[in-house]
Amino acid sequence: MIASAEDDSYLVELTDGVLRLSFNRPQFGNAIPKTAVPGLTQLFHAAQADPSVRCIWVRGEGKIFSAGGDVASFAQSIEQDVATRQADFARRLPLARGLVEAIAAFDRPIVTSVRGAAAGAGLFYPLVADYAIGDDSATFVFAHQKVGLSPDGGVTAVLPQVVGTRMARMLLMTAAKVDAQEALRLGMLHRIVAADALEQEAMKMAVRLARAPQLAITRAKKLVNDAPKQSLAQILDAETDGIVACVGDPDFEEGVRAFLEKRSAVFPSTR
């Protein structure tokens, strides 16, 4: 079901095909409590199943995007004996895995707007996003090591895709803190804008993507995501299949007519 969390730890709103997901614990750095993980997982599954959701925009309320997992909750863990502690985390982590898999499986565009820090598991959202925008305060904090942990939350799956394997190793092993300009240079951000323009510019891009021809845009995302695992022949076959599917879609007819008539296309899949 597409709905805000019962405890308001995150808020959702669907407008013009854009599902806005806002982390809503600014007093806790928008850390994501473990109680919110099942709801967020269901939210992404529901969005995938709902054709009216054509783009997801992820943002944080207040001055921080997301501190990731709720590290404060780890305090009770260190009071447990080692075997109990490990068993507790072994039970918890599959829930986080389910959320990562649900986000990665969403086949339409994801936009993130980063204000302040994205840290820990919160890094996954801008790193997996198809478009990540930030203001000058945007900071990427690879903080797992500071509490004696290796990375999780899907970060090691997406970070090498963004910055390359060697750079990813350096960022993670040095517990790096990357500012907005360096994040832009490394490709973790696509654009930096003024703080007072961040929300408007993120929404503008989300709406633009939500108005794109849906079969064409989902095929493009899948082709790029699948390419590293395929041979050139497989990639070319997939591209052929995509074009054949798209020319049979009403969006193709509208796109060609709009081009010939020198007007903006209004694609049937976005109505």
Image: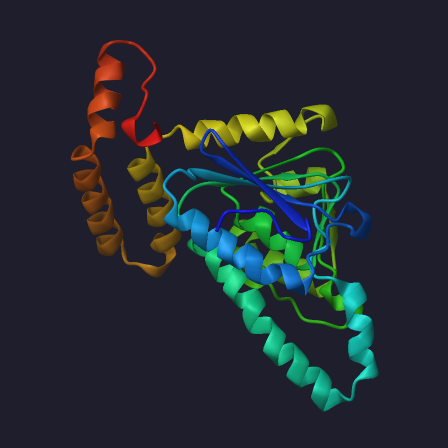
**Vertically, is 250 above or below 168?**
above
- The quadrant holding residue 132 is top right
Q: Residue at x 81, y 48 (%)?
A: 27
**Vertically, is 62 above or below 9?**
above
User: Residue 110 at what x, y percent from top left?
Assistant: 50, 42
User: Residue 76 at what x, y percent from top left?
Assistant: 81, 76
User: Residue 68 at what x, y percent from top left?
Assistant: 69, 57
- The quadrant holding residue 88 is bottom right
On the question of residue 95 being in view, the answer is: yes
Q: Residue at x 20, y 34 (%)?
A: 249
Q: Nearer the viewer, residue 138 or 248?
A: 248
How many marks the image carries: the answer is 0
- The quadrant holding residue 114 is top right
Q: Nearer the viewer, residue 235 or 216?
A: 216
**Vertically, is 129 above or below 207?**
below
Q: Residue at x 58, y 50 (%)?
A: 125
User: Residue 93 at what x, y percent from top left?
Assistant: 60, 72
Q: Is residue 175 left or right of residue 225?
A: right
Q: Residue at x 79, y 52 (%)?
A: 28
Q: How is the image coloured?
A: rainbow
Q: Nearer the viewer, residue 224 or 39?
A: 39
In the rendered image, the residue lying farthest to the front is: 6
On the question of residue 106 being in view, the answer is: no
**Vertically, is 115 above or below 235?**
above
